[in-house]
Image (spheres, helix red, strand yellow):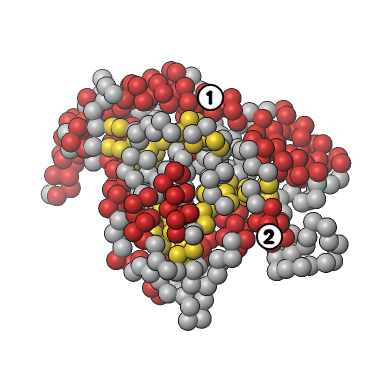
Amino acid sequence: MDLALLGGTPVRSEPFPTWPQHNKSEEEALIAVVRNGSWGGYSKKVKEFETAFAAFHHVPYGISCVNGTVALEVALRSLGIRCGDEVIVPAITFIATASSVLLCHGVPVFVDIDPATLNMSPEAVRAAITPRTKAIIPVHFGGQPADMDALVEIAKSRGLAIVEDASHAHGALWRGTPVGNFGDIATFSFQAFKLITSGEGGIVLTRSETLADKCRAYCNHGRSVSGGWFEHFTLGTNYRMTGFQAAVLSEQLARLQTQTQIRQANVARLRKQLASIEGLRLDAEDPRVTSQPNYLLTLRYDPSAFNGLNRDGFLSALQAEGIPAKATYPYPLYRNPLFYRKNLPPCSCDKWEATQDYESLYLPECERVCHDGIWLEQNLFLGTSKDVDDIIEACGKVQAMSQNLLAVQQHIKAKEGH
């Protein structure tokens, strides 16, 4: 039973389910838009999708846009974030969560995560609030809703806005209520690997008619719903989604619940079987999370259970066995060159001032997950229970043979040393 990395037979040779997934319904929807001649942002398919997606999340207003990054910017602009305003964000997230703050000339304030969920720590949020703080952006990371009970309480007590970054969490439920209902405004992404996708795309959800009007105006050159084509009431630009995107997304939305149920069943099987493999664990299950769509699973790796084999060595062996696992972010968000002093501030006025020295910032739980985290992406769990069994078998095989792999690695190093 040699490891595939050492010349043995891999556990798995067939591919996992691919993403994105589509069928004839997407093709027919696209053809219908082509034939009706209304291709742009005023296509009736755009309004249909906005209405359906908002209703799916029990929210009255949905404003579509070209991508999830833009959705965050639009949400912050609707809340009036401007130069010098501080916005608290987690340091384990995609760059857009923080760069959208900078695009509004706000100041990102990074906080640490809860190691059990990878979502922002409410205690860290409390400690980060200053008189300049205006908003909090909790990210429902991997599809796991953040602790909205605690975060809503903090926001209300301190007069702060909440922007839910739900780019990973389409259809996720917190205490039976869909994400997007807990803050002032929420954003979703339809980028190529998201749970529903049109290649690119995004949407803003809100329960506030005032915020919805502001978002729609900003996405549509400052027009109002009741105004004329050449009437521009406020500053805006063109962030409109096309009819083609909306047509595809409508079909994707129709199968989201079924795909979520498949992933949930397979992830439950994985969680149960992982109990037999010391040194690999998933995030803790929170009973307040009543539906988790499992966009991204993060395994935490303990090398001591693998004879000292480091995380990257384990990953190489696992990938050779046919399991396309990946390392997490290489470092927390604040270590990106964007946040070097020479690249800040984003504006020349005297109101912008960084609250943190990003280059010396060290948030221990964020640093730790970048060192020991492993990602399994959502498409791996859209197949059958055998796919899960193969993942478990490959992990167990690498663990059983880890001493052999280490011996080979040490031998190679010794030869290189000569």
For disc 2, the marked residue is 214
Give the residue pinned by disc 1.
261
Q: Please say if 85 is above or below 33.
A: below
As displayed, is residue 169 above or below residue 16?
below
Q: Position of residue 203 (x, y in %)?
A: 64, 48
Select label 2 or label 1 by which is in front.
2
SS for tag 2?
helix
Q: Position of residue 37 (x, y in %)?
A: 86, 45
Q: Secondary structure at mark 1?
A: helix
Question: Is residue 413 or residue 241 the one in the foreground?
Answer: 241
The crowding category of the residue bearing disc 2, from other C-alpha atoms within 10 Å (few below 14, some 14 to 19, many at least 20), is many
Which residue is found at the position 63% from the left and 48% from the top? Answer: 207
Q: Amino acid at mark 2?
A: Lys
Q: Is residue 179 left or right of residue 287?
A: right
Q: Is residue 350 above or below residue 137?
A: below
**Front-most of 131 and 271?**
131
